[in-house]
Amino acid sequence: MSQEAKVIIGISIVTVLILIGAVFFLSGAQKEEAKPAEKVTDTKQLLGDQKRIVKAPNAKVTIVEFGDFQCPACASVHPTVKQILKDYEGKVNFVWRHFPLPMHKNAMLAAIASEAAAEQGKFWEMHTTLFDNQKEWEESGKAKDIFVSYAEKLGLDTTKFADALDKKFNAERIQSDQDAGITLGVNSTPTFFINGVKENGVLSYDEFKQKIDAASK
C-alpha cells in the first residue's frame, strides 16, 4: 500500500470517529433537553405576599408571572393571559409579580403607578390600562402625567395618586418581587411559573391550555 493511500485511509478513519462522536454528543444534548423541568418548591419565595392575585379558592393551578409593564413581550401576551383567566375562571389562580427591567426607563414608574392604583382598589384596572396603552407612555418624558390621566379615567383620586407616584409608593415591595425573581432564576420578562414550573417567554393560548390541563390532573 502506498504512503498516499495510508494517509487517505487514516483521514477517513478520523473523519468517521469525529462523526460518531458528534452523533453521541447531539444524542446526549437531546436527552438533556428532554429532562423534566425543575419545579420550584419554595412557595413563599414564589408567591410572595399574594396581594396582586386573581384568586380561585378551589383552583388546582397557580400561574405566577414576573413581568414588566414596559416590556413589549409582556404586552403581547397580556390578552392571552386575560383570555386564559376568563376561560379558566374559578380553576386558576394568577399572581402578578413586578420585574421592571433597568433598560426600560418608565418601567419602574409604571410599576409604582399600578401600586398607587392598588391603594385605591384599582390594581387590575391599571394593570390592563398600562399594557393596552404601552406605546403611548413607554418612551415618554411625561409618563407621570400620562399615568395621572389614566388614574382620572379610572375614577381615582388623582391628587392622592400623583402624590403616591412622587413618594415612590410601595417601591420596596416592587424591589422585593424583583429580588425574589432573581433568586428563582428570572432574568427576562415575561417569565411564568405554572404550578412552580418555569416557562420563559411568550406562551400561546394553546401552550397555556396544554400546561394548565396537564397540571390540573
Image: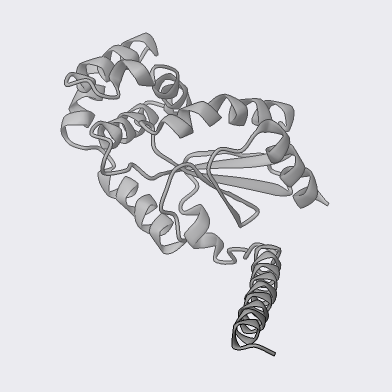
Residue 48 appears in the figure: yes
Q: Position of residue 93 (x, y in %)?
A: 63, 42
Residue 102: x %, y % from top left: 26, 44
At a point 30% along the width and 34% down the height, the residue shown is 107
Compared to 193, does 127 lie above or below? above
Q: Quadrant of residue 130?
A: top left
The image's colouring method is one colour
- Asked whether residue 157 appears in the rendered view, the answer is no
The residue shown at (72%, 46%) is 211
Left/right of residue 19 with respect to residue 131 in the rendered view: right
User: Does 9 appear above or below 163?
Assistant: below
Q: Quadrant of residue 41?
A: bottom right
Count of numbered badges drawn on the protein: 0
Which residue is farthest right? 217
Horizontal side, residue 117 vs residue 172: left or right = right
Task: Quadrant for the N terminus, please.
Answer: bottom right
Q: Residue furthest front?
A: 2
1 or 62: nearer the viewer: 1
User: Is residue 104 placed above or below 193 in the rendered structure?
Assistant: above
- Rendered residue at 65%/34% (across/down): 204
Given residues 105 and 130, the one toward you in this image is 105
Residue 154 lies, in percent from the top left, at 39, 13
Q: Nearer the viewer, residue 37 or 164?
A: 37
Q: Position of residue 62 (x, y in %)?
A: 64, 47
* Rendered position, 209 above or below 136: below
Q: Nearer the viewer, residue 71 or 148?
A: 71
Q: Residue at (61%, 79%) from the top-left corner?
A: 11
Q: Which residue ends up furthest to the top in the rendered image?
A: 153
